[in-house]
Amino acid sequence: MSQVWFTVKRARQIANVGLYLLARMLYTDGKVAILAYTGIYAAGIFRWDLPTLLVFAVILTPFSISGGFIGGWLDDTLGSKRSIQIAVGVTSLGMVAAVSIAHDQILFMRYDVTAAGPLWSFPYFRTLPQVTYVAITMLLAISITAAFCISRCPGPH
């Protein structure tokens, strides 16, 4: 506790450290929130129940894992700064695309679900908007995990 108190008293002298820690916290918490809210958004928009959300999470897991490998490769190839810019850019585009999906809409355009009918007999993700949303969140899982990896593992550049 004495070290914490000492640090608080010295806060003005080490303001850059405090700003870094605040920015880092918002950056990482923001990425976690994006991943968490993909399920919350889907539950609200598509009325997915718990089993559907669990299948959704299981489907996204290998894409999240691959994001770590992709992030490491990008970091080694392009350097940390450029790789983070790419990962954050892809995440931003993916977020806009994800919120453009609704039960009767794809990329902000109307889609007649009843006229199109189900895509298959699989009990989950039966409509084109749902499949499109899952595909977009796969991209989000890759880009967010890549950003985590790049941010934690400084490369040689």
Image: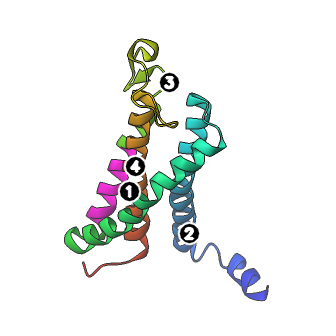
For the residue pair 105 and 146, the one nearer the viewer reads as 105
Circle on res. 2: none
Region in magenta: 81-92
Give the quarter of the figure containing the N terminus. Answer: bottom right
Amino acid type of the residue that numbered disc 3 sits on in the rendered structure: His
Q: Is residue 141 visible?
A: yes
**Dot 1 lies on which element?**
helix
- Residue contact between numbered discs 1 and 4, judged by CB atoms under 8 Å: yes
Furthest toward the bottom, the residue is 2
- Amino acid under disc 4: Met
Residue at which label 2 appears:
21
Q: Position of residue 35 (x, y in %)?
A: 52, 51
Please indicate, yes or no, whether residue 100 appears anywhere in the rendered image: no
- Give me the C-alpha separation between circle 2 and circle 4: 29 Å
As measured in the structure, the alpha-carbon distance from the residue carrying label 3 to the one carrying label 1 is 24 Å
Between 33 and 27, the residue placed more toward the observer is: 33
Task: Kindly identify which residue carries mark 3.
Answer: 103
Say whether disc 2 or disc 4 marks the residue closer to the N-terminus. 2
Q: Earlier in the sequence, mark 3 or mark 1?
A: 3
Q: Residues within 10 Å of mark 2 (few under 14, many from 20)?
A: few
Where residue 22 sits: x, y (%)? 57, 63
- Contact, mark 3 vs mark 1 (Cβ under 8 Å): no
Give the mark nearest the N terminus, 2 or 1: 2
Relative side of 8 to 32, left or right: right
Asked if residue 140 lies in the magenta stretch, the reply is no
Q: Which residue is mark 4?
A: 138
The residue at the point 43 percent across, 45 percent down is 137
Q: Quadrant of residue 68?
A: bottom left
Q: Is residue 83 magenta?
A: yes
Say which mark, if any, is on residue 142.
Answer: 1
Q: CA distance from mark 4 to mark 3?
A: 18 Å
